[in-house]
Image (cartoon, rainbow, N blue to C red):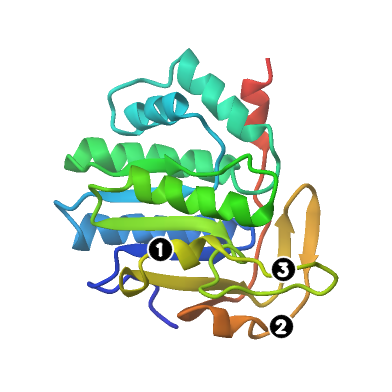
Amino acid sequence: MNNLTPSVETRFFVLGEIHGACENVHVLRDLLHFCGQKRTGEKTVFAFEWLLSSSESKVLNEYILGELDFNGEVKNIVKKLYSVESGAFSDQHLDFLAEVRDQNIKNGSQIKIICFDSEAQSWNQRDKEMAEAIMRDSKDASLVIIVTGSLHARKQSFTLEGEDGAFKPLATYLPVNDTETIRLHYKEGVIFNFGRQKITKSDQPQDSSYYDNVYVLESATPVTYEQKKRFDS
């Protein structure tokens, strides 16, 4: 897959990433530009695997819509997002939120954020609840760009060696005809996911059959947490 853009028929565009690569956010930046150029006037949502309450999500959206400045309440929410160094939120994601805000203010866009993570104890229950949150909070959106771990983006149930039972991913709950799933694959590199981790070199992922398409990136570089220091006090 050379061009990472959703088709006209796609409503749910699911990106299956490995958390902790800067290139994940580069992809989001390209999609934000695409929305500004090709989906003007449409309601677009970026949905992230972040754990926030509905009231916290509301405040975050008020910030990116330009209705709030980067005040104490917003800072506390960012501090909470920084508290889990899984790579799902990082300095690069914070910068991306500022870019979404700028585009909303400059272009009169209505791009919003959904935070859909769940505290469910079982993997299957968590994925079911995450899908339900996305469906519930995106009813008025024409395009929903979902950013999640690659296992959650699979379109079929699967098993794992050494684990009992089948795993039913988030993407299996989304409307089949309106959903496109993309596996982001990094040929090599380093990520930051609870510490620096090296990616085993490979040209194609072994699980490509679980997705509609694979988008190959040459190398991964780790996200950073330098700005976290601003929120630790």
Residue lying farthest left? 41
- Indicate which disc, 2 or 1, sits on the residue closer to the N terminus: 1
How far apart are the two marked residues, 3 and 2, measured between alpha carbons? 10 Å
Dot 1 amino acid type: Leu
Callout 3: few (<14), some (14-19), or many (20+) C-alpha neighbours within 10 Å? some
Q: Which element is circle 3 on?
A: strand
Residue 200's disc number: none
Q: Position of residue 43 (x, y in %)?
A: 22, 49
- Indicate which disc, 3 or 2, sits on the residue closer to the N terminus: 3
Q: Position of residue 128 (x, y in %)?
A: 53, 54
**In percent of the image, x 48 and y 72: which residue is there?**
182
Residue linked to disc 2: 202
Residue 199 sits in which quadrant? bottom right
Q: Is residue 84 above or below residue 167?
A: above
Residue 104 sits in which quadrant? top left
Dot 3 amino acid type: Gly
Q: Position of residue 17 (x, y in %)?
A: 58, 63
How far apart are the two marked residues, 1 and 3, measured between alpha carbons? 32 Å
Task: Count up the numbered dots.
Answer: 3
Residue 142 sits in which quadrant? bottom left
Q: Position of residue 162 (x, y in %)?
A: 85, 70
Q: Nearer the viewer, mark 1 or mark 3?
A: 1
Q: Is residue 20 visible?
A: no
Residue linked to disc 1: 174
For the residue pair 164 and 104, the one nearer the viewer reads as 164
How far apart are the two marked residues, 2 and 1, measured between alpha carbons? 30 Å
Residue 189's disc number: 3
**In percent of the image, x 45 and y 83: which residue is there?**
1
Left of 52 or right of it: where is 175?
Answer: left
- Indicate which disc, 1 or 3, sits on the residue closer to the N terminus: 1
**In percent of the image, x 54 and y 48: which residue is there?**
49
